[in-house]
Image (tube, grey):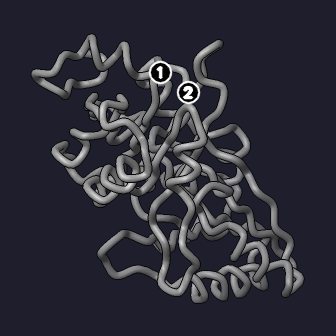
Amino acid sequence: MNGTVYLVGAGPGASDLLTVRAARLLGEADVVFHDALIAEDVLRLASAAKKIPVGKRCGRHSTAQHFINKRLADAARSHRVVVRLKGGDPMLFGRAHEEIAYLTSRGVRVEVVPGVTAALAASADLAISLTRRGAARSVALVTPRVGKGERESRWVASVLAADTAAIYMGAGEAGAIAAALIGAGKPAQTPLALVEDASLPGKRVQYATLADLPRLVTRGGPTLILLGEVYREALASAGLQPLSRRAGS
């Protein structure tokens, strides 16, 4: 093995939120294996690299993880700089552990380059901190999604225990999420923000309560549910009609 595989965080979408290190490695890359929804202007930074899409999209055909692992190892045999470009941060819901374990077990050098995760980008869009002195001192980052054959997730308990929660990959399960949390004791009037396409010019924000969550409609872009009392003031300012507004309007 003569190459290194770099697990690089592409951030939430906006190309200017890439780290300097991520941009440098893309410019040096021989081959880039990239997730779905990586912006074209990010991929253009890898001008000399062969670009191979290996993204996973819910409800659509996607590349099997074991096949991605093998392709990364094979690429490291013939290339010096192999970039595995992941949306957000590689170490958060990015299956980085599986790729790292596979590669290191085969003697492949691996380095991780962090990226801006969606919860931080969405918070910046809203100008609302995930924490607040005297009111919110804990944050949970969770997803209700569970793969086939995996053990049951304890995401509900994590949300109940935290002052603020960021729920990833949950837009398509809004009804089940609301029912599970309310059924477990979370107040139905807990305020939330639904942020779609965080960091991008077309980002969209909807404020609502947990009880209203199933009635919110998205456009199909990457969506994050932010839940907690830190959004109470924003909900009151937005009013009940309409529940949604464009960020920055």
User: Are dots 1 and 2 in contact, CB under 8 Å?
Assistant: yes
Q: In the picture provided, is 122 more to the left or to the right than 113? A: left
Query: Which image quarter is the N terminus in?
Result: bottom right
What amino acid is at disc 1? Val
Give the quadrant of residue 135: top right
Residue 149 percent across, percent down from the top left: 53, 87
Residue 157 percent across, percent down from the top left: 56, 53
Q: Please tell me how crowded label 2 is: few (under 14), some (14-19), or many (20+) other residues with Cα within 10 Å.
A: many
Choose the circle earlier in sequence order: 1 or 2: 2
In the picture of the structure, the residue carrying the numbered disc 2 is: 130
Q: Which mark is residue 67?
A: none
66 vs 185: above or below: below
Residue 118 percent across, percent down from the top left: 50, 42
Q: How many marks?
A: 2
Please state which of residues 19 and 124 is positioned toward the viewer in this rendering: 124
211 vs 82: above or below: above
Query: Which image quarter is the C terminus in?
Result: top left
119 vs 142: above or below: above
Q: In the picture provided, is 66 more to the left or to the right than 108? A: left
Q: Which residue: 65% across, 32% down? A: 138
Residue 129 visible: yes
User: Residue reaching furthest left?
Assistant: 241
Q: Please tell me how crowded label 1 is: few (under 14), some (14-19), or many (20+) other residues with Cα within 10 Å.
A: many
Is label 1 or label 2 in front?
Answer: 1
Q: Which mark is residue 230?
A: 1
What amino acid is at disc 2? Leu
Give the quadrant of residue 247: top left
Q: How far apart are labels 1 and 2 at the CA level? A: 7 Å
